[in-house]
Amino acid sequence: ARAPIFRPLRTMEFLHDAHAQYLHKLEESRDSFEQVVSEHLRCSAVYWAYSASSILGADFDVERAVEFVKSCRNDDGGYGGNAAQDSHMLYTLSAVQILSLCDALEHVDKDATAAYIAGLQLADGSFQGDKWGEVDTRFSYCALCALAILGKMDAVDVSAAADFVGECRNFDGGFGAVPGAESHAGQIFCCVGALKIAGKLEEHCDAELLGWWLSERQCDSGGLNGRPEKQADVCYSWWILSSLSILDKVDWINTEKLQRFILQCQDDEGGGISDRPNNVPDVFHTFFGLAGLDLLGYFRTREDGDRYHSINPVYALPKDVCARLGLQEQPAGDVDKEPTPEASQAAEAAAATD
Ligand code: GRG
């Protein structure tokens, strides 16, 4: 008999132990295909793996993580994606996040790292990713998030940073990478997060219109896409749910359908979560799938709910780590409540003007 083209529908059980083992194996198998192709961004991969482990309440090798981050540090105060690589804003945030997870921020020279970040801010408030000059709202988020964690927000012009992010807002309520660029869910997370950290969310964001745009991203499969007419992908469970969570509008999507979609993306053989059902898992989607389930309140409904660590939607770090750092707690978001009549009306009005 011929092998079936598609595997039967995967289990709806949450595979805690398989995921913990998958993440543990990643730590051990440095020469696997996945590890080799992600060598250049290893600092971020380590952040995804360790924050995923934290959500699961699984152990990771703190000493090894700290040594690795130290090896990525450059004399300019920034961090590269791996040892002997140029500094970049993306990896500087990942480095600071890993050290936060390890409770080892004393290994950062806070003044030097803040100066590196401040040196990448331009006169219009935007941030370059590195000395080569690309500007993108991802880097605005990375800059403000890292500085908030380090307690060094005063190193940059926060108000100008927020004004630049505001310039990237579009007619549909979403945000893009630069002024005039298409709205994209990944950039929206960065912009909403940056504005929240800057304390300027209300000034630069139309929460009702953006809530409508974000909730329109749910596809028939229950998964979320990153912009109209694109495929659903587990990573948007994070980029969109974190934004909805900051706006306190998680209940504007069908949370049960999204939960089912994420559970279907689990690999029931080797653990880990993939972008779509039946695809190969990777560490990026494993972290964002677990973080998405957490923001949906899924772990709180489980009998073993106490072992999980809830994630903060702004700083993308466990809430207990944020509390330890004195970072502001975000509203939990009541995922069971119905949208208020005012919220539904506003969303309908916004849809009518599209
Ligand atoms: C600490 C969580 C955290 C993030 C740091 C790097 C960063 C800040 C944010 C990245 C935000 C972003 C732009 C995410 C999108 C990533 C992604 C899946 C891009 C794919 O884009 P396309 O055009 O995919 O290939 P679509 O889904 O539009 O077809």
Image (cartoon, rainbow, N blue to C red):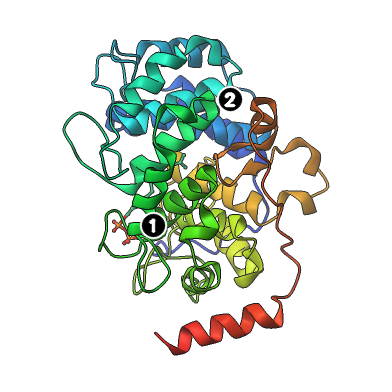
Residue 29 lies left or right of residue 133; in this view the side is: right
In this rendered view, identify the residue nearer to me: 18 or 354: 354
Quarter where residue 176 is shown: bottom left
Kindly state the secondary structure of the residue where label 2 is placed.
helix
Q: Name the amino acid, label 2.
A: Leu
Q: Name the amino acid, label 1.
A: Gly
Would residue 34 be visible to someone looking at this image? yes
The residue shown at (43%, 69%) is 173
In this rendered view, identify the residue nearer to me: 329 or 155: 155
Q: Which residue lies most toward the bottom here?
A: 352
Quarter containing the C terminus? bottom left
Residue under label 2 = 101
Kindly identify which numbered label has been placed on residue 263.
none
In this rendered view, identify the residue nearer to me: 206 or 11: 206
Q: Which is closer to the viewer, label 2 or label 1?
A: 1
The residue shown at (50%, 44%) is 198
Does 177 sit above or below residue 343? above
Residue under label 1 = 166
The residue shown at (18%, 37%) is 133
x and y percentages locating residue 89 in the rendered image: 33, 31
